[in-house]
Image (cartoon, grey):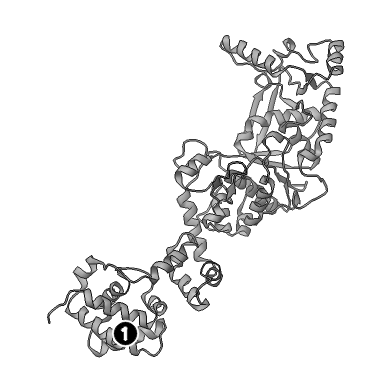
Amino acid sequence: MSQKVRVRFAPSPTGPLHIGGVRTALYNYLFARKTGGTFILRIEDTDQARFVPGAEQYILDSLAWLGISPDEGVGADGPHSPYRQSERKVLYRQYADQLLKEEKAYIAFDSSEELEAMRTLYESKGSAFQYNALTRVKLRNSLALSKAEVDALLASETPYVIRLKVPAKGEIRFQDSVRDWVHVHTSSMDDKVLMKSDGMPTYHLANVVDDHIMEITHVIRGEEWLPSAPLHILLYQSFGWQAPQFAHLPLLLKPEGNGKLSKRDADLGGFPVFPMEWTDPQSSAISKGFKQEGYLPAATLNFLAFLGWNPGTEQELFSLDELVDAFSLERINKAGAKFDVNKAKWFNQQYLKQSDSKELAQVYLPNLPAKDADAFVQLFLDRVTFPQELGQLVHEFSQKPHAYDEVVLATKWNLEAQKGLHVLAASLPTCSTWDADGIKHAIHVALEETGIKMGKVMQILRVALSGNGAGPDLMISMQLWGKDEVNERINAALSVFPKLAS
């Protein structure tokens, strides 16, 4: 690859960044890192009517949280500044004028009412209206009107748009890195608007102009843009520019697999589809975010990477550097990827297990002594999906049992177990070293002296202390409860367990 790779993520600040957009940013980032290229963030805010305050900062914060911030662009600056399309307005007009001059575009004065009337007419005849080579000669534009009429309309400041003049006969073909060869006949394309009546460019013009000026070599974007790709290829051809290599990513599908993943699906399923929590500036409605729900950045990235890509191996857990090494456009799938939230939870569990227990303790159990907090984290880490669950588990752990496992009592509570529990009630208060190893040693010695095997008592001891027949490491649990608490719980259990006659 002779030309240095330059890729861009180009979201619109119209609300919170959908997790599908995050995946697009991630794939661009991975490809840039893999090839030694540059990852650019461009904000495409030409649709000012849909602009939402705070959305741009939300995009920057989300990428920063995940550790995939841009090398160049909004938030990073660079040689092609500014990187907000609203600040490049004059530039786009120059290129639109170039196409007008070369008769590859034209001015259209049709009002919205006139276009609606034309749509209604076509629908009444059972067909769909397209503004194209067949219909443009019948409409109010610089191709159908005389020069004098056009000049008069311009002089009277009649609102107009600039449309691309799509050839009546021709074929657009290009090779997509994911879809392979794409062929579209120009007769199926309409004369898309390039400049709107307010002087702002449409996405299509601004996108192509910016990608060319910013020397973008690869456009990696969602499948929803595939229908627009032939138009973009035609624009590149109209300007005489080399088009970048396209790669259109598969859709993110609902968990059940039918249809595109939406916020409504997330609300119904109780899971997030945004990287961070979002508060709507108008309604104040709050949407869940992966960050606030307790997903770790590394787990989120690993989960997203596998939504439409696979490494070709059995490995599932990847660091960001490992994802960079393994990533390639050729291994992106064509088929849509089901958004399996249970898989996302699994990834989070795996990364939690690998997390530093002391750091988790500091963040999620700040009110406990550091030693105890760290021990609690180690005790429960393989039992939680999200780190904030640690606090709830600690709360439950500190509560004395209000009921006891009846199945274990029915099968394990016998004379030997009863005798062993009385032995421990008498001996444990004298244990001199109250830590997991010291407690285990004290139990072993006390039971051995009375000829009782530990296996006959340990599950009953667990039930007496916690109420449950299973749970985390019992010795560490006893260490954390403390000697007095353990003694109280054993005696409380002995007072309610059935008295067995010897």
Image quadrant in which you'd find residue 384: bottom left
Q: Residue at x 69, y 34 (%)?
A: 49
Q: Is residue 327 left or right of residue 303?
A: right
Q: Judging from the image, what secondary structure is the residue with disc 1 in?
A: helix
Q: Residues within 10 Å of mark 1 (few under 14, many from 20)?
A: many
Q: Residue at x 76, y 53 (%)?
A: 76
Q: Is residue 165 left or right of residue 394?
A: right
Residue furthest to the left in view is 501
Q: Which residue is mark 1?
A: 443
Establish if 249 lies above or below 442: above
Establish if 176 lies above or below 356: above
Q: Is residue 33 visible?
A: yes
Q: Residue at x 38, y 73 (%)?
A: 473
Q: Residue at x 43, y 69 (%)?
A: 394
Expressed as whole percent of the image width and height from the top left, the position of residue 111 reads 72, 17
The amino acid type, in three-letter code, at marker 1 is Ile
Expressed as whole percent of the image width and height from the top left, the position of residue 456 reads 24, 78
